[in-house]
Amino acid sequence: MPAEGLAWLELEDGAKMPLSGDEQTNKVLKDRRLNGWDFEVYGNRQQDGSFVILPIHQAALFTYRDGKQLRLTYYCDVCAIRTYSPGICACCRDETRLDPVDPKTITRSVNGPTL
């Protein structure tokens, strides 16, 4: 994540490919708390040279800590509600905190992706 501007994917040749996604994914890409973090993203390269990340419900945004893959999530400590993009809690209206977690600890829906 860059300190300013758009998030990008650095290719092996050093070229930078702009990242984008659905509304919720774009909120994550603009979260200043993630400035300077490295990510693993899943999605599709576009003909215009950009990279579109899969929709937020398909578990396509990860980071690493101590060599362990973590899914980017946000959590409300008051209401114990986990979301996948930053913002205010739907219940108490407090700001959610960034909370990267082991993807295996997140309950998946029946139709959700396999991690």
Image (cartoon, helix red, strand yellow):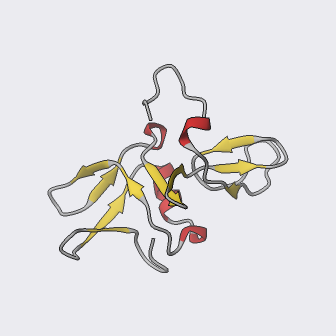
Identify the residue at horizontal 34%, vertical 48% (top origin): 42
Farthest residue, direction front: 66
- Classify the position of the N terminus by image quarter: bottom left
In this image, 86 relative to 49: left or right? Answer: right
Residue closer to the observer: 64 or 19: 64
Q: Answer with the quarter of the image where residue 6 lies.
A: bottom left
Image quarter (top left, top right, bottom left or bottom right) of the C terminus: top left
Pick out the residue farthest to the left.
47
Q: Residue at x 78, y 41 (%)?
A: 80
Residue 87, x across and y down, in percent: 66, 55
Q: Is residue 100 left or right of residue 44?
A: right
Q: How many dots with numbers?
A: 0
Residue at image position (60%, 49%) is: 73
Q: Pinpoint residue 38: horizontal percent, then vertical percent.
A: 45, 67
Residue 69 at x, y percent in the picture = 49, 51
Percent across and percent down for residue 24 are 51, 50
Instruction: Tell me what residue is drawn at x 40 percent, y 56 percent.
Output: 40
Q: Say left or right for 77 vs 1.
A: right
Q: Point out the residue furthest to the top here.
A: 110
Left or right: where 70 falls relative to 86: left
Above or below, comparing residue 22 to residue 14 in the picture: above
